[in-house]
Image (cartoon, rainbow, N blue to C red):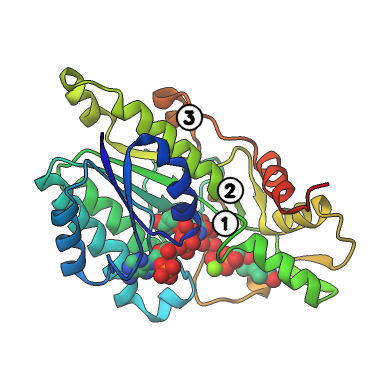
Amino acid sequence: MKRILLIGKNGQVGWELARTLAPLGEIIIVDRQVVDLAKPDSIVSTVREIKPNIIVNAAAYTAVDKAESEPDLAEAINSIAPGILAEEARRINALLIHYSTDYVFDGTKDEPYTELDIPNPLSVYGKTKLVGEQAIQAANVPHIILRTSWVYGGRGNNFLRTILRLAQERDELKIVDDQIGAPTWSRMIAEATAQILGQVMRLNKSEISAINELSGIYHLTSRGGTSWHGFAQSILDIMSTPIPRLVPISTSEYPLPAHRPQNSVLLNEKLERVFGLILPEWKAALELCLDETRPQA
Ligand SMILES: NC(=O)C1=CN([C@@H]2O[C@H](COP(=O)(O)OP(=O)(O)OC[C@H]3O[C@@H](n4cnc5c(N)ncnc54)[C@H](OP(=O)(O)O)[C@@H]3O)[C@@H](O)[C@H]2O)C=CC1
Ligand SMILES: Cc1cn([C@H]2C[C@H](O)[C@@H](COP(=O)(O)OP(=O)(O)O[C@H]3O[C@@H](C)C(=O)[C@@H](O)[C@H]3O)O2)c(=O)[nH]c1=O
Ligand SMILES: [Mg+2]
């Protein structure tokens, strides 16, 4: 039986992974008390003690605006820690699964981004996540980096929960409509990750080189795209919430510390070609997610 170390117990994606990875092996799930990604010693000692076959890192510094004033902490968690994890994984020949973001791109492309497009992050968060990707890729370790976007779900800090909360408090919300991306349900990310891992684990020893060939970056998002305004409108429509009124605004009317890409839709063609996986269209997934919040008859 394979041993899987899951870092990020209480995050949106980590919480779902704790469930979807369950049938794949013995999962050791750790929170920040055990592995603090800002403390390299805790990373090294935990990996050496547990000796996992697979490491899944779902923890990150995800406060996009706060990162602008805490670049050192964001760098420690998002850039340096993934490199340490990769080095420790290499020592024990473990596979590393890691997540990254659409915010590695500058958003100036007017078509969906592929894995071959050159990143050019606009924010500290995006920069630190890009350096984390590069550290893993430089470590000569089997790895799968899954770039996702606009993650939401029933738990944690996310745009869906912010809008549902604000809908109770205000009768008008101003929401930017000139940033386009793909809202992606944390559940779908975790389900797809389990499918990928299941496929990789079924490769036998003679196919070990295949694992190295599979190593790399994969875009993993819902299909289609919308603006934050479109996302918010769909949330309210699906929940049949007549108030608040949503007013579309431009990014310049909603100044924030971090710059965000205008277009960060990611093409998932590689994920489909290599693993045969296709996530649902963003609105279909949103309906499935919101269905769970309705009381059962
Ligand atoms: N959220 C999004 O919209 C997107 C996320 N991603 C990426 O997906 C991955 C998962 O994100 P998501 O589930 O949304 O993250 P969340 O923001 O929901 O959770 C982040 C997790 O990281 C943990 N964490 C933060 N700092 C540390 C630390 N120093 N040591 C250990 N753990 C720490 C948090 O722990 P604690 O609970 O203790 O605070 C929390 O469990 C990340 O790599 C993120 O960059 C990519 C695109 C979009
Ligand atoms: C709450 C609110 C937000 N907005 C805008 C601000 C911003 O441009 C956009 C999204 O705001 P948020 O802060 O919720 O989302 P943000 O933190 O930018 O979300 C990002 O998080 C990181 C971790 C990622 O990796 C990205 O993929 C992305 O999901 O919506 C409004 O226009 N009106 C509002 O009332
Ligand atoms: Mg935010």
Q: Are marks 3 and 1 in contact (CB under 8 Å)?
A: no
Quarter of the figure that contains the N terminus: top left
In the current view of this chain or complex, which residue is farthest to the left? 91
Q: Earlier in the sequence, mark 3 or mark 2?
A: 2
Q: Say whether residue 83 is left or right of residue 291.
A: left
The image quadrant that residue 245 belongs to is bottom right
Residue 204 in the image, given as x and y percentages of width and height: 22, 20
Q: Earlier in the sequence, mark 1 or mark 2?
A: 2
Task: Tell me the crowding category of disc 2: few under 14, some 14 to 19, or many 20 or more residues within 10 angstroms, Cα based.
Answer: many
Residue 83 in the image, given as x and y percentages of width and height: 20, 56
Q: Can you tell which mark lies on residue 269?
A: 3
Q: Can you tell which mark lies on residue 185?
A: 2
Residues at marks 3 and 1, CA–CA distance in whole angstroms: 21 Å
Q: Earlier in the sequence, mark 3 or mark 1?
A: 1
Q: Residue at x 46, y 77 (%)?
A: 66
Amino acid on which disc 1 is placed: Gln
The image quadrant that residue 58 belongs to is bottom left
